[in-house]
Image (cartoon, rainbow, N blue to C red):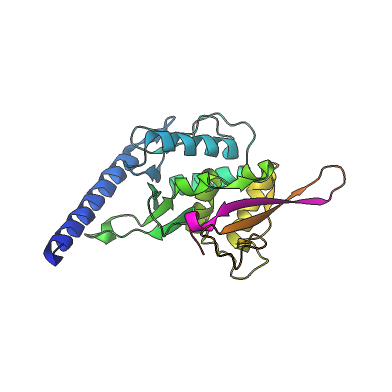
Amino acid sequence: MSLLHFSTTAALATIARVVCLLFLFISLVVSTVHGAAFTNSVVCRPELSPARRQELAAQLREITGWRELSFDQNGVMRPGSVQVGGSVTAREMLRAASSGPRLVILEDASERADIVFCRVVEGRWVKQPEAKPPVSIVLIDFKDFSHVVGDRDAMATFNIGWGVLHEISHVIHDSLDADRAGEVGQCEQLINRMRRECNLAERAEYFFTFYPGMERSEFKTRYVRLAFEQQQPVSGKKRRLWLMWDAALVGGL
């Protein structure tokens, strides 16, 4: 492929992305929820399929307790008016994200090898950035979550919905991840509070580790595991739970 062809293709892709974001932003500014004006700054890119939007919405409903939470035909997140149970901290954070000045774009990154579960990156406007809102793009690898196996109680607290909330926490609270083993970091401390409010197991560490015996394995499969803890209601003791996946498929090694 010639350099000219590559540059032209890249430029067209950039222009299309900017036009798409601008269209979405215009739709967000004029939208309302149940009669009250909202910026509605959490929105899916058009390429995020209806099935995956529904999957994410279902998991966010369980976490937040917003039983009508959904993404409308323009991809805008709508919390609805019915709330039963769920995490008050998660609701507060999503309200802040929805009504804040920063645009949060949810993007399907399932074919990208550099995304491990989820990641947030800064978006950039090509023209007149001073007249447009700041943009954060939450990249979601839906396929990565399908490779996770382990204790059922840990599975309930580590899914696409929790991954997206983790990245939105970076955006809203500028919280940091752990930088050393044995810690969860600021971001997961906040997510763990949400888990407690949902009576779910909490993440015990930020970093995954090799499954015992896999450190020097010559096989292509490289299993890793991630620790969670759940407090027992009677004894008060904490039970260690594990999730596991093949890092050769998910990435992150």
Which residue is most to the right?
A: 235
Q: Quadrant of residue 62?
A: top right
Residue at 55%, 59% (x, y): give it.
Answer: 222
The answer to whether one can see residue 143 in this image is yes
* Left or right position of 220 against 241: left
* Left or right position of 129 against 75: left
Residue at 49%, 49% (x, y): give it.
Answer: 144
The answer to whether one can see residue 198 in this image is no
Q: Nearer the viewer, residue 104 or 216?
A: 216
Residue 79 in the image, given as x and y percentages of width and height: 49, 35
Position of residue 60 relative to residue 116, above or below, is: above
Residue 249 in the image, given as x and y percentages of width and height: 48, 54
Residue at 31%, 46% (x, y): give it.
Answer: 25
- Magenta-drawn stretch contains 191: no
- Magenta-drawn stretch contains 239: yes
Residue 154 in the image, given as x and y percentages of width and height: 66, 46
Position of residue 69 relative to residue 251, above or below, is: above
Residue 12 in the image, given as x and y percentages of width and height: 17, 54
* Left or right position of 119 against 127: right
Residue at 26%, 44% (x, y): give it.
Answer: 23
Q: Main secondary structure of the magenta part?
A: strand
Residues in magenta, as a range? 237-249
Q: Nearer the viewer, residue 137 or 93?
A: 137
Position of residue 12 relative to residue 86, above or below, is: below
Q: Quadrant of residue 120?
A: bottom left
